[in-house]
Amino acid sequence: MKLLLRIIACVFFLLMINSFRATEKIIIKGSDTMVYLSQKWAEKFMQKYSDVSIQVSGGGSGIGISALINGTTDICNSSRPIKTNEVRKLMEKYGTTGVEVNCAIDGIIVYVNEQNPVSNLSLSQLKEIYRGKITNWKSVGGKNARIVLYSRENNSGTYVYFKDIILQGEDYSPFCQNLPGTSSVVNAVSRDKFAIGYGGYGYGRNVKMLKINNIEPTIDNIRKGLYPISRYLYMYLRNQPTGAVKNFIDWVISPEGQKIVSESGFFPIN
């Protein structure tokens, strides 16, 4: 009986030790475009390394960079480069300009409803549409109907990228409706015959993806840099990574991590 009690006590002690084993936690915040991809990375990485816990959330690139500056995230996902004033805040608070990691390539796709006869827009037409200068589909070869504009919210890296590159820094039309996340944009466009929206390649389901400057948004065209609206996706850190964060970053840019990039509708950096 005493032997049995000793065995039970030993097993209980081992279970207690195991339950209190240190688990390294990684917090990732930022780009909504990258949420699905980062969740896939996190799932695979935690399967390989059971002593690491990874928490992923979105909110937009701006939210992620603010969290990096405030110290409430280990890694910031961003679909736009960090801004000069954001780097300055990092320097003022931590004495570092931060660390940038290119982790994937994305094509910004322009979506219209599947019933829309328009199949191609030039970059200049796209700019004039989102500036509110072209307001009728008839002006670009479509039906005589008002163009309904959808965009991402202004804390989104995709919103900022589109404004900087397509609108060349000018303001969006005041009639442009901002939605929280690319999935919301795609859903709105799929329901509205006269809508237009934009977002990542991996989200383009149940909508028509337009050619831009007569170049189709195919995997090969985006990967080769032929499609005119392509960008890097980034991870930002305050300092050079160590421990579990370094292992995770190294794995993300490894062939295994980059395979998940391809499987998630994005394009590997190598």
Image: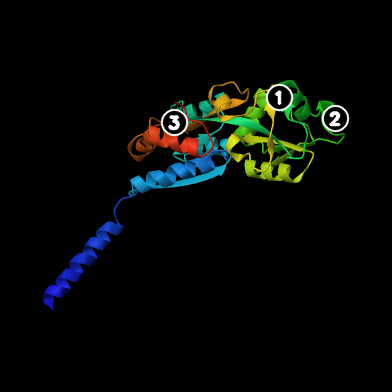
Whether residue 185 can be seen here = yes
Looking at this view, is 5 or 93 the one in front?
5
Looking at this view, is 41 or 218 the one in front?
218
Q: What element carries label 3?
A: helix
The quarter of the displayed image where residue 144 is located: top right
The color scheme shown is rainbow
Find disc 3 in the rendering and name its residue.
94
Residue 240 percent coordinates (x, y): 38, 30
Query: From the viewer's perspective, is 228 left or right of 256?
Result: right
Q: What element carries label 1?
A: loop
Residue 188 percent coordinates (x, y): 72, 44
Query: From the viewer's perspective, is 247 left or right of 27?
Result: left
Find disc 1 in the rendering and name its residue.
167
Q: Which amino acid does label 3 sit on?
A: Tyr
Tell us which disc is closer to us: 3 or 2.
2
Q: What element carries label 2?
A: helix
The quarter of the displayed image where residue 187 is located: top right
